[in-house]
Image (cartoon, helix red, strand yellow):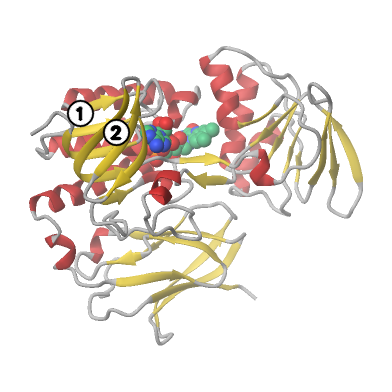
């Protein structure tokens, strides 16, 4: 076997890739490599200098860097090969990977590839934020890299755009380094994370301005103010010296797309079955690239689960899926942004503990799973904030008897 041949090549050394690799080694898979484009493995938590990480994995509360360090150590101890500064730039038929490395372009061969490339916050261009282009406009992840890795404070009085959980992470990061956010601005009428979390900005005297649109970022060469329109139409200027664009996560799916995988419109990432199989029999996908976004603990657990499916596939190549039949597509219906997995293979439906979904906005009412004829199979009451993760349990449902599509829809409360 050549030194560039692996049983499993994992693209991305974040919590998902590291936990999957460790589990594969624990299950006796001989040659497991992680290809990570950064100089260090660990993924996003490397930049998050604050807790809470690690409760589910290590039964303690860690900061992001301590957590990332521990995941990397555990993978190393299990015998995983981790190649940093290795960016996978393409995959080819039959498990070929093209990799840009410090030694030039390499070609690797793997029986199975796992794509675990994560998600990132939407850029200013993707968010269509108008105005000038001064310095001092960045995402939460970039802010955290500035502060925790480079020990630099990029501004003193920024506004935070967004009201997701990660927006609270931006507040914590700011306050830990003497930065006093001027306001948290949300274009939607309601905060995007659970309302109960919003005691935090209130307690830290950061006003939350919902229903507020940015009309222009102003200043040159640095940000000096942001012009906004409040709910009701009144316009105002917020003096500030920076802008943090938080949340609105986008799947890091460039490689999946370049590999020709079927993508899901709702998540933007590869469509998968409950075992993490993509539309290519050699490629699995897991973590935030398939659901932007979940916590690190969720991704870690998913990495382990998908590793077990990959180990089964390695033992009985391609047979695992064929023996499970065509399976059933799960369609996100009215009111839902996405449902993951998008396909349930007939056998082993129980392997998907639950459908993982997000609503288009605040969701209050009933979620109804029905078959192709519209007959309801299960329903669940729901009252969730717009970006709140929602789980719909499949436990006990016999879905193997049929192969028609399933549809999950939201019936809002009148
Ligand atoms: C600002 C911020 C704060 C957060 N705070 C918390 C928190 O407090 N608690 C919590 O539980 N979760 C938090 N999260 C979420 C958590 O970080 C993620 O859920 C978790 O990191 C997802 O793991 P992942 O492995 O799927 O992806 P990632 O951690 O994003 O890892 C993906 C890896 O893939 C690599 N990669 C991408 N493309 C390629 C390629 N082509 N070739 C090689 N490598 C590639 C990337 O460099 C990266 O290292 C936070 C997220 C953000 C953005």
Between 259 and 252, the one lying in front of the other is 259
Give me the residue at 42% from left, 46% from top: 289
Left of 114 or right of it: where is 370?
A: right
Q: What element carries label 2?
A: helix
**Residue 14 can be seen in this image:** no
Q: Nearer the viewer, residue 296 or 4?
A: 4
Report the Cα–Cα distance between label 2 and label 1.
9 Å
Which quadrant does the C terminus fall into?
bottom right
Q: Is tag 2's residue or tag 1's residue first in the polypeptide sequence?
A: 2
> Which residue does the numbered mark 2 point to in the structure image?
18
In the image: residue 172, left or right of residue 329: right
With respect to residue 332, does 169 lie above or below?
above
Instruction: Give the mark count.
Output: 2
Image quadrant where one finds the N terminus: top left
- Quadrant of picture, ligand 1: top left
Can you give x and y, in whole percent of width and height, for residue 366 in the image?
A: 52, 71
Is residue 250 at least partly visible in the picture? Answer: yes
Q: Horizontal and vertical percent for residue 104?
A: 33, 24
Crowd around label 1: few <14 · some 14–19 · many ≥20 (10 Å): many
Would you say the residues marked 2 and 1 are in contact, meaning their CB atoms lie under 8 Å apart? yes
Name which residue lies at 34% across and 58% down: 272
- Residue extending furthest toward the front: 104
Q: Where is residue 244 in the image (x, y as percent from the top left)?
A: 67, 32
Residue at the far top: name it. 151
Q: Mark 1 points at which residue?
A: 80
Q: Nearer the viewer, residue 403 or 168?
A: 403
């Amino acid at each position: 076997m050549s030194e560039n041949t692996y049983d499993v090549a994992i693209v991305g050394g974040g919590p998902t890739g590291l936990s999957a690799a460790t589990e594969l080694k624990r299950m006796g898979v001989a040659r497991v490599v992680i290809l990570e484009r950064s100089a260090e493995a660990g993924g996003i938590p490397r930049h998050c200098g604050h807790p809470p990480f690690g409760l589910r994995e290590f039964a303690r509360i860690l900061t992001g860097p301590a957590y990332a360090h521990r995941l990397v150590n555990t993978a190393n101890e299990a015998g995983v090969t981790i190649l940093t500064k290795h960016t996978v730039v393409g995959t080819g038929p039959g498990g070929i990977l093209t990799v840009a490395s410090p030694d030039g372009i390499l070609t690797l061969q793997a029986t199975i590839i796992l794509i675990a490339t994560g998600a990132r916050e939407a850029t200013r261009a993707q968010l269509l934020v108008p105005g000038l282009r001064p310095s001092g406009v960045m995402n939460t992840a970039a802010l955290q890299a500035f502060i925790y890795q480079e020990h630099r404070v990029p501004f003193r009085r920024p506004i935070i755009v967004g009201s997701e959980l990660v927006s609270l992470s931006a507040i914590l990061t700011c306050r830990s380094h003497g930065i006093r956010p001027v306001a948290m601005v949300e274009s939607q009428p309601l905060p995007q994370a659970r309302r109960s979390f919003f005691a935090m900005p209130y307690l830290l005297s950061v006003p939350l301005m919902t229903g507020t649109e940015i009309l222009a970022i102003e200043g040159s060469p640095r940000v000096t103010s942001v012009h906004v329109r409040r709910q009701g139409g009144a316009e105002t200027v917020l003096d500030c010296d920076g802008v943090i664009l938080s949340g609105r996560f986008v799947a890091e799916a460039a490689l999946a797309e370049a590999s020709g995988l079927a993508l899901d419109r709702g998540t933007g990432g590869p469509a998968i079955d409950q075992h993490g199989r993509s539309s290519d029999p050699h490629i699995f996908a897991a973590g935030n690239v398939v659901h932007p976004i979940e916590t690190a603990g969720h991704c870690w657990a998913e990495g382990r689960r998908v590793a077990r499916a990959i180990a089964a596939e390695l033992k009985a190549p391609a047979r695992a899926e064929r023996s499970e039949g065509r399976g059933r597509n799960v369609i996100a219906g009215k009111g839902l942004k996405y449902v993951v997995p998008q396909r349930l293979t007939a056998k082993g439906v129980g392997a998907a503990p639950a459908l993982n979904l997000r609503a288009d906005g605040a969701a209050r009412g009933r979620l109804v799973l029905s078959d192709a004829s519209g007959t309801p199979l299960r329903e669940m009451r729901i009252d969730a904030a717009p970006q709140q993760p929602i789980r719909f349990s499949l436990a006990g449902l016999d879905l193997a008897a049929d192969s028609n599509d399933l549809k999950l829809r939201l019936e809002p409360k009148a």
